[in-house]
């Protein structure tokens, strides 16, 4: 055994902590900037863009959607060309460049260029860090779930300090000081990764996973793939011809992009099932991943409103103690993660030893029920706000607590499940697909925030209650699907 595979005999691989800190600094930059983005977009006084809530929500949704959507080509690039380690390095460089551009205060066109650079870099870095984590656990099992829970603490450690520091700089000093701080954070993460990776990761994620075929072994693209692509193009063409796609506003563009992304994902999964040469068990596992994907989309659509509609609620309708910036509410999620992610990870390991560990779909259903409970608290808070009184501090605090518990049940388990169930030759691509679920959730969250304008205040309770019912219904459906699909796992836990 070489030092690149060195492990703490009764603990976790040392390489996990290299990736822990790399991801921590990347999440500092991403969540820090995201914490102030929508407030910068709607600001009309302190040098912001002065957009309407609808426009700002659409831009927020499109940006966060793009950042995670780019994980799909980012995973493909790593699998086929770069390898995961090189993809992480290049992605970090793009992110640093993007945040520097955002800090320039050079007008809308340059600002949107910066958002694009950050999105590209996130797509290259985010899925491939997680893929390298999975390579540290070839044995799989509950230890991998625990490792991902520890990794998730790093994500939230970075996001907490990012939202606190960047949020303060943005809302109290100047928007572009916040954007600049995000660039510094990613630079620190890149330096740490390049310095420690050779020693503790070795060849983990060093080379592309897909072996390039020679001329004699190249296989033609299957006819089924061409048929599926033709069906996709025909569908998109008909939608455009019938006027279902519109590009004349930011909201319409965001809606159209969401429909296109959903269609592409469905065709991608269909191609895996019908034309990728998978055996029967692999196809069943892809079926499980398909269910997990849509469960994650719906969960993130509610959860990721913390940076959009919940941020607007915090700024306009919540009591803020000690004069704290409203963006600090978003850091509560990360703080709760510190407390509960290791505990929940330990619970899964304990239950596994007792053969009582809940199936993955059950954990997803629990997450949606907790999300529903959090939004029911928001229904109560919005009714208080309608009386002209600021909602108590504990309203958003309770909401974030319940949402965090749901996140801990879903996100690290979902990450681990994708790495365990995905065929190895498609691992990075399917990790990219996992982050596309987050992309779609962010897009829908941004569109929902468009309803939080001053003229629509009376609709807040109904808006939040609609999410409650939606989460309860979807969670119940997923819970029902758990038993008939349990054998599709093929013995993988």
Image: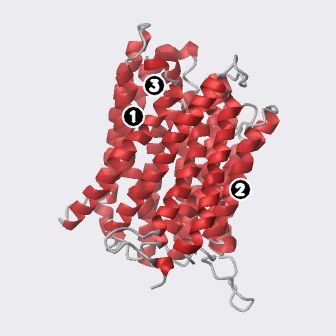
Residue farthest to the bottom, as pictured: 216
* Residue 245 visible, this angle: yes
- Circle 3 Cα neighbour tier, 10 Å, few/some/many (<14 / 14–19 / ≥20): some
Q: Which label is found at residue 400?
A: 1
In the image: residue 127, left or right of residue 13: right
Residue 232 location (% of width, % of height): 66, 57
Q: Is residue 186 left or right of residue 357?
A: right
Camera-nearest residue between 394 and 51: 394
x, y percent for residue 87: 66, 65
User: In the depicted view, which residue is nearer to us: 4 or 131?
Assistant: 4
User: Helix, strand or loop at disc 3?
Assistant: helix
- Mark 1 secondary-structure assignment: helix
Q: Which residue is mark 3?
A: 463
- Above or below: residue 319 compared with residue 73: above
Residue linked to disc 2 = 93
User: Which quadrant of the view contains residue 368?
Assistant: top left
Looking at the rendering, in which quadrant would you find the C terminus? bottom left
Please identify, in this view, whether the residue under mark 3 or under mark 2 is nearer the observer.
2
- Neighbor class of circle 2 (other Cα within 10 Å; few <14, some 14-19, many 20+) is some
Task: Give how far apart the Cα atoms at labels 3 and 1 are.
Answer: 18 Å
User: Could you tell which of marks 2 and 1 lies nearer the N-terminus?
Assistant: 2
The picture places residue 1, in percent across and down from the top left corner, at 45, 85
Which residue is at 22% across, 61% downward?
350
Circle 3 or circle 1, nearest the eye: 1
Quarter residue 334 falls in: top left
Q: How many marks?
A: 3
């Amino acid at each position: 055994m070489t030092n690149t595979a060195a492990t703490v005999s009764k603990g976790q691989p040392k390489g996990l902590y290299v990736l822990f800190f790399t991801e921590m600094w990347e999440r500092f930059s991403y969540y820090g900037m995201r914490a102030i983005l929508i407030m910068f977009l709607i600001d009309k006084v302190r040098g912001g863009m002065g957009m309407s809530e609808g426009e700002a929500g659409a831009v927020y949704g499109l940006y966060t959607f793009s950042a995670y959507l780019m994980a799909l080509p980012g995973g493909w690039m790593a699998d086929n060309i770069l390898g995961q380690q090189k993809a992480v390095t290049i992605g970090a460089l793009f992110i640093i460049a993007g945040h520097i551009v955002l800090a320039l205060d050079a007008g809308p066109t340059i600002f949107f260029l910066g958002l694009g650079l950050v999105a590209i870099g996130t797509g290259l870095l985010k899925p491939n860090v997680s893929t390298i984590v999975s390579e540290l656990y070839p044995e799989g099992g509950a230890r991998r779930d625990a490792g991902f829970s520890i990794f998730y603490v790093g994500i939230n450690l970075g996001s907490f300090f990012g939202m606190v520091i960047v949020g303060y700089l943005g809302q109290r000093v100047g928007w572009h000081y916040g954007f600049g701080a995000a660039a510094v954070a990613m630079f620190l993460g890149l330096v740490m990764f390049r310095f420690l990776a050779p020693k503790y990761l070795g060849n983990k994620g060093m080379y592309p996973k897909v072996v390039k075929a020679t001329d004699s072994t190249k296989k033609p693209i299957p006819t089924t793939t061409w048929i599926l692509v033709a069906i996709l193009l025909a569908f998109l063409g008909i939608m455009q011809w019938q006027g279902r796609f519109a590009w004349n506003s930011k909201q319409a563009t965001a809606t159209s992009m969401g429909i296109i992304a959903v269609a592409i994902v469905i065709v991608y999964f269909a191609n895996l099932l019908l034309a990728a040469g998978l055996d029967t068990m692999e196809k069943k596992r892809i079926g499980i991943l398909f269910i997990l994907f849509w469960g994650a989309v719906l969960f993130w659509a509610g959860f990721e409103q913390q940076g959009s509609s919940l941020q607007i609620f915090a700024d306009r309708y919540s009591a803020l103690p000690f004069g704290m910036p409203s963006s600090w509410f978003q850091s509560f999620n990360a703080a709760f993660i510190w407390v509960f992610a290791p505990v929940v990870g330990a619970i899964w390991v304990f239950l596994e030893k007792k053969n009582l560990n809940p199936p993955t779909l059950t954990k997803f259903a629990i997450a949606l029920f907790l999300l529903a409970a959090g939004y029911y608290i928001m229904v109560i808070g919005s009714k208080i706000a309608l009386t002209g009184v600021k909602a108590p501090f504990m309203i958003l605090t309770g909401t974030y607590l319940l949402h965090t518990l749901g996140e801990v049940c879903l996100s690290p388990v979902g990450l681990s499940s994708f790495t365990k169930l995905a065929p190895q030759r498609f691992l990075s691509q399917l990790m990219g697909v996992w982050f596309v679920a987050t992309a779609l959730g962010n897009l829908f969250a941004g569109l929902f925030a468009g309803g939080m304008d001053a003229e629509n205040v009376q609709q807040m309770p109904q808006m939040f209650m609609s999410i409650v019912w939606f989460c309860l219904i979807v969670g119940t459906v997923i819970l029902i699907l758990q038993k008939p699909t349990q054998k599709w796992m093929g013995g993988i836990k």
